[in-house]
Amino acid sequence: MRRQPAMPIRSPFESSIAKPGQGHVVLSLLPPNNPTLTTLTYKYPLKLVPRAPGFVPTPDPEVLSDECPSRPVHLYLLTYGGGLLPGDHIEVTIELEPRTRMVVTTPQGSTKIFKTDPSADSSFNVIKGHRNKLPANEHISDMSQQSLDVKIGRQAALCYLPDPSVPYKNSRYAQVQTFTVDASAKGDQRSSLCVLDWVTQGRTSRGENWNFRFWKGRNEVWATDAKSGKSRLLLRDSVILDDESEALDDSDSEEETGGPIESGLNSHSNRAETPPPQPGLLPLNEIIQERTRPHGVVGTLILSGPVFDKLGAFLLHQFTSQPRIGSRNWSSNSSTAPEPSLSTNGDGHVTWTAARVRAGFVLVKFGAKDFETAKHWLGGLLREEGSIIREFGEEALFCL
């Protein structure tokens, strides 16, 4: 009689269920008021490090109740090497259950977008950590990509203030950040959102001045009704900086319902309409420089929800009180809503605009002489108003 083989012993060290470059986070609120990461998975080249700071947004931890906000959980988003290599794909999904709060920052500093080797045969490159070959199209196969998908429950709040991305010379990069809020929540029950998205001209110490090949950032805010399952687009903001003459596939051209608000620097929905450079015009490597001149950094700040209402009102007030470029007073009441004008700070090194758009969003666009100027200007405004420090602690402003 043949002996049956013994059952293999199950390893206590389970391998991560995450795919390479993917991470998944769920923040829950356990009774009575204890924020807990019930799900946290990630895999190389991505790393997610949680931290529960001692900061509490109330004077006494003992008075926490159903009506009081919960402690914020701090999540560090890292990549090995401090940046993204050609072909790296990072995908992060975060779910904030009702009444939770999260701060997301990048403790490594700026996200470096490493350059693409123009002479490399892209058709044989592979994604770091993957075995599948990349597309044969040489203009997208070596592109670094990053996506962030966040679901924010009612009374939950996200404060996402990362360091800027620094695209190296000849690099290509695209990111999509999607935020979904509860469509049925009203008033103080609404989700709250603060998102900063900015990009610099590159490594100025090495003489780089907007010398990358392609950079695209898209931020979308959706409202979803859990009962009906219907979603509508509230806000879409796109920035495309591109010196390529070939048309790339752009999902912004897809039809959307719900009448989204769209804005952006050099944003366009159909790249095929962009004519290739003609003889006698700017060479390709100067197209982005011409679009962004005289700025060394450009960025967008998006604010929404009751937690950031005071901050949004403060920034709008600061904007209307600053000297304008041009003579028209855009703050005067009128039957039509004109495009917001540009304002400059005291020394003229920061140009910015702020506007309240549909669904109560406050959208701030800015350009600054360099990273340090932008950091001190924006950080000064946020610290002066104080909402972020009161609600999330000083750590939320580490990048500023």
Image: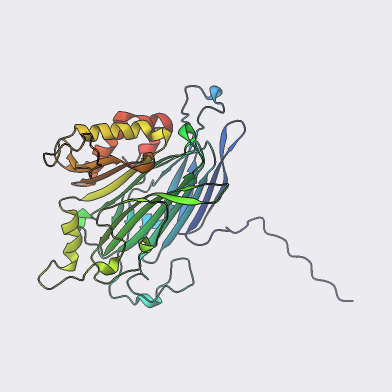
Relative image position of residue 268 (x, y in whole percent) = 28, 60
Query: x and y percent of residue 100 in the render?
Result: 52, 37
Front position in the image: 45 or 220 = 220
Residue at 15% from the left image edge and 51% from the top image edge: 294
Which quadrant of the structure image shows residue 319?
top left
Residue, x 47% and y 49% (percent of image)? 150
Furthest-left residue in view? Answer: 280
Q: Residue furthest right?
A: 1
- Residue 224 is situated, as x and y percent measured from the top left of the image, at 50, 48
Q: Is residue 289 left or right of residue 381?
A: left
Q: Position of residue 358 (x, y in %)?
A: 36, 43
Residue 207 appears in view: no
For residue 274, above or below residue 14 = below
Q: Which residue is the extreme one toward the front?
A: 335
Residue 149 appears in the picture as rendered = yes
Instruction: State which quarter of the image contains the N terminus.
Output: bottom right
| Pick the front one: 263 or 100 | 263
**Eyeballing the image, is 174 above or below 49?**
below
In what quadrant of the picture does the C terminus appear? Answer: top left
- Judged left or right of residue 308, residue 10 is right
